[in-house]
Image (cartoon, rainbow, N blue to C red):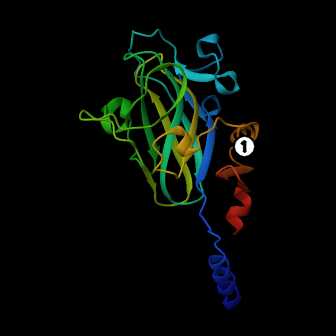
Amino acid sequence: MKKKLIILALLFCAGFIIEAKDIEIALEAELAQRIEEPMKIDDSNKGKGASNGKFIWMEGKPAVGGGGKGWAEFDIPIQKKGKYAIWGRVLAWDGNSDSFWVTWKPADPDEDAQATQNTKFRWAVQQGPEWHWDRVNAWLDGGTPEREWDIKTDGETVLRIAVREDATMLDALFITSNIKAKDPAGANVREPTKKDQEIQKKGFGGLAVDSNGKISTTWSILKNQ
């Protein structure tokens, strides 16, 4: 123990800074563990440029609105308790196709937001006819504060993205412990890599957590430590 303290002191004196890396998890929307119709996977040109060539949505025409049924659920193992933010790669044409309901258990209660219409779980998606990253917010009657989830214990979590308006498209998700970032670049958001896709397909049985894209480890190793 004394030897470790001496080494740390020497590193500090030499000007080295030891930083804790952010937890980052990249997910393909179409690889959700469960998808309830009318939410569906689509690979048409309507979502041209989507990561992996696919996206999810409740099919519909812009300027129509509607929706309110269907969802996608992601089973996500969180290795480290703490606060997290969620970014989505989205396409939203107009004011009638720019929102989802978002709940993440156990940080959020076991509540069906489509039924309760609780604005705390309403995500006002930034509009735009091209794919872009948008941080999940709480679309309240008085504003749209960015959401943070306080995961109090490590283990399995369930993220649900539910339809509020048809024609709102979701391509990918990026979960990060960097809650202070206000823009995609600052949050280091990225599309899922082939490795991310394989991890997700296997239910996170392999490499599951990237810390700033530099450190990867397996859940089996983490559980044994």
Q: Position of residue 202 (x, y in %)?
A: 73, 42
Residue name at image x 63 percent, y 79 percent: 13
Residue name at image x 57 percent, y 28 percent: 35
Q: Amino acid at mark 1?
A: Ile
Is 212 drawn above or below residue 111 in the view shown?
below
Taking depth in this image into account, of 5 and 38 the one nearest to the observer is 5
Residue 13 vs residue 105: left or right?
right
Residue 45 vs residue 84: left or right?
right
Q: Is residue 39 visible?
A: no
Q: Is residue 44 visible?
A: yes
Crowding at dot 1, Cα within 10 Å, few <14 / some 14-19 / many 20+, comes out as some
Tally of marks: 1
Q: Position of residue 16 (x, y in %)?
A: 65, 70
Q: Secondary structure at mark 1?
A: helix
Q: Classify the position of the C terminus by image quarter.
A: bottom right
Residue name at image x 57 percent, y 40 percent: 174
Q: Classify the position of the N terminus by image quarter.
A: bottom right
Task: Name the residue beneath numbered marker 1.
Answer: 199
Q: Position of residue 57 (x, y in %)?
A: 53, 21
Residue 129 vs residue 51: left or right?
left
Is 50 drawn above or below residue 200 in the view shown?
above
